[in-house]
Structure formats: structure tokens, C-alpha cells
Amino acid sequence: MDNITAKPLLPSTLTPRSQLKRNHGEIIDLTGSDGDDDDPSSQPNTVARQEQEERPAQRRKFGDDESESESDEDSMIGDYVDHFEVDPYVAASERDGLSQERSKALCIELRQIGLKAFTDKYSRSIPMRTLGTAFGIDPELGVPDEMYAGILRLAINRAYIKRLKLSQHNTIDDAARLLRRSKKTMVITGAGISTSLGIPDFRSKNSGFYDQVQALGYADGQDVFNIETFDQNPADFYSLAGAILPDLKRFSPTHAFIKLLQDKGRLQRNYTQNIDNLEALAGIKPDRLIQCHGSFATASCRKCKHKVPGHAIFEDIRAKRIARCKRCVKDLAKEVTRPKPMRKKRSSLKLHKNDWDSSSGDEDDNIPEPGVMKPDITFFGEQLPGSFFDQLTDVDSKDVELVIVIGTSLKVAPVSEIPNYLPAKVPHIFISREPIEHVNFDIQLLGECDHIVYELCRRAEWNLKHEMIPRDMRVNVAPVEGSTYRWAITPAQIANEPKPQKSSKANGA
Ligand SMILES: [Zn+2]
């Protein structure tokens, strides 16, 4: 287990962007002038429009892959900004930093006057570590000033490109209206849409999955999904993967909701971060689905790239046994039977238990080993499927009419960056158990997503049927205190228990 090393100061719930091998695409030289973002004629009420016009510059950067050139310091800066975005520093008193009112005013001004003018104005008049508090950065952060400046630059830049809430959309009825109106709805999904089926949300603190991972000695639960870790010690992944292996027989009412959108010709695309492949089971067509982190639908050999249907290795996963590549085994068998006078022949292909651990110490590179099969889920340290970036930037961002984010806390880049990337006028609805702060949504519907999509459909006068939805289900919709656009949705009454159906196949129509 010597491959597991201490990590820098990272909150465990966050994924270092660098591990996803994507470019931040956000660090802008604040001293450089590109002319159009410091236009003094900009008025507050034109900010949204102005942003739409400015965003193309940002857009080009989304998906640019310059990750190879990203330095460790860049990735650490990104990690710190991720952290403060989700868990911002708030000054307790004026002595500790800028007040919330002042911070808010500065953020508004930043959007009005642009990056360059803002930096010119405040980089000298406010001490750096005080200015940082307006962007949620802890003034006591124990990093050298030079790095602190990098963190501040990136934080300011993120604040600048952050989407603004559209004031006209606030209620669940607004959401239902948007649903009916939109002919191209983008649905972004995460683990929360599968938890009602018993598939653990492994980013949730209470899922237990990461506890299991940590019991194996990993500092961070996500390390088991690190490609280097996998290559060095695939046994750990195989001992755990059974817990997240798709059941393949059921999908949730939320999956049925996405299928319903497709049936109505309104699903532009479903970008899913899930690897359970249940979207396919629910009937989402391949051309409507982008599996941002891959899926268990196929598996590939780490050595010869041989690809097989995912289910071919499920038995091994369930038995907690490392799956070997059959093609490699075949090729090796041929090699072994072929006379090779120059090389000492191995009598058996059977691997000794310690072959994996001793590979670095053993100098004999000629010992043949069949490759290890890996499900085609995207591990940290691997590229995301190219289809994600192409589809988003070249096609979907151009004509999307509505975005619904369901069951994800949007903490993992680059999916987390989609709302800030899309045109400012596109309404965004958020559906999940917990509210989020680091992305501005127009409407936040909080509760069980299966209940919420049911209620949305009911209000849109659509009939969402699913065996897990009780007949005549009614829900309560209550405003969350202190908010005009956050709503808590809870079941009000259940008139009938779910009626057992003859077929286990749910009806999404
Ligand atoms: Zn192979």
C-alpha cells in the first residue's frame, strides 16, 4: 500500500480537478487587456446580455485540453478555489475581513466593470488578503503570498463568469411551465437519481462506500478510482466494485422522467455522471445520452485494449476476483506453445500471488502476464470521453432551452462547470436533497428527486408512471425559510401502497 501517499490539504468531498485531467481554463491574466470587459458604458441592467456576448471567450476554453502542461501549483490553486467556493470563508467581524454587504457589492461591481478594471481599481487599494475575503478565501490561509495571489486571481475570475440567477423564475409552477415550454431540455444527473434503488451515492458521507474504501487503508475514498492505484493494485478495486455494480433490472422514477422527456421529443441530452448505465436500461437512446464518466456497459484490457461487453466481467466483480483479459491469455498461450529457444520457457501461465507486488522489484520483464480488465468507467487520471466535450461545446450549448440538474451536488469538474458555461439566458432548475450555494440556480427543489419529478410532471399535466410511485401520491411544497426560490418537497399522503405489478419492467410512457 505504499502507493498511497498523504494528500495536500483537500476536503475529501472534493475531487481535485487536475485528477480529471482537464484544464481549468479559467486562469486569466488579469493584467492583460482584451478590450471589451472594461467598457465604462456597461450598465447594471445590461450585465446579463453583456455576459452573453463576452462568454464566447470563456467558452473556447471549456474543453481545451492543456492538462499535460498544468503545473502542480496550478492544480493546487484550483483545488483551493474549489474548496472556498463550496465552503467560503465568512469574516466574523470587520477586523477579520470585508463584511458580507461589502463583499456582495464588490462582486456586483466586478460584473459591471469587468476583470481588468476591477483589478486595476482594487489590487492596490485593498490589501490582498482582505480583498480575498470578499471571494470567500481565508486570509490566514497558510500559503506563500505568490500562491495566495494565484488563488485570488482564479477566485475573482470564477466569480466573474458565475451565472446569475434569472429573477423571473422562482416557483415550482415556474419550473413546470419551463418544462412544458422547452423543446430542448438538458438533464444533468448524478448519483442521487439512483439512490432510491439502493445504489450507494459514494460522494455522500453516509453511504458507507467510502468507509469501506478507507478500511482498506486509503486516505481518500476516491483513491480506489485512481488509475495509477488500479494499475498497481487492481485487487482493491475488485474487492469493492461489487457494491456499485448495477443491478440491471430496475431503474428509478427519475430515470423514467428522463425517458418521458425523450418520448415527448423534449430531451436534448442527458449528461450523466453515473456509471451504473441505468439510463440505457430505462430506454434513453444512445444519441440522447452522454455518460460523462463512462459506464460499466463495456470493459477493456489495460494491456491490449481488447474491449468486451461489461457483463462479461460482472461474475468476477461479484466474486471479488480480478478479471483477466481472455485475448491476452490466448495470445500468451500461443507464445508459450511456440518453441522459443532464446527464452527460458515458463511452464505455467498461472500467476503467483505476489507477482503484482513484486513487479517493480523483479527485473525479468519477459514474464508474460495477461492484462487486467477494467470497466470503462473514467478513473481519476484518465481522460473523460471526448464525446462529452464535443457534444456540449459544438452542439448542445448552442440551442439548449432549459437545464435541469438532478441528484448531484455539482462538485466534480468539468460537469460542475456546465451551468457557468451555458448562455446566461438559459433557465436552470436544481433538484436534490440539499441546496447548493456555489452555483446560482433559478429554482431549487429540495427533497427526494423521485417525488419532485413526479410533482413537476403532475403540474405540467404529464403522466409519469412508475411502479415505485404510489398511486395518487401528493406532496407538500413549502418555501425554505429566507429564500424565494428554494422549496422543500415532501410526501403529503399516500393514499395507496404501491401496487405490485406483474411485470418488473416499469412503464415510462
Ligand atoms: Zn488483453
Image (cartoon, rainbow, N blue to C red):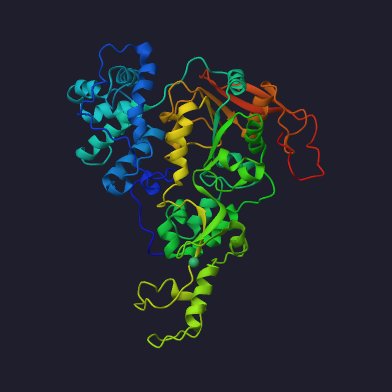
Q: Residue furthest front?
A: 338
Q: Residue furthest bottom?
A: 341
Q: Nearer the viewer, residue 261 or 2?
A: 261
Residue 71 placement, left or right of 406: left
Q: Quadrant of the N terminus?
A: bottom left
Q: Quadrant of residue 341?
A: bottom left
x and y percentages locating residue 64 in the rendered image:
35, 40
x and y percentages locating residue 440 in the rendered image:
45, 26
Q: Nearer the viewer, residue 408 or 138?
A: 408
x and y percentages locating residue 129 in the rendered image:
24, 31
Q: Nearer the viewer, residue 460 or 214?
A: 460
Tell me: residue 279, above or below residue 114.
Answer: below
x and y percentages locating residue 149 in the rendered image:
23, 35
Task: Mark yes or no: residue 87 visible.
Answer: no
Q: Nearer the viewer, residue 128 or 295?
A: 295
Task: Mark yes or no: residue 50 visible.
Answer: yes
Q: Quadrant of the C terminus?
A: top right
Q: How many marks?
A: 0
Tell me: residue 38, above or below residue 414.
Answer: above
Residue 411 placement, left or right of 115: right
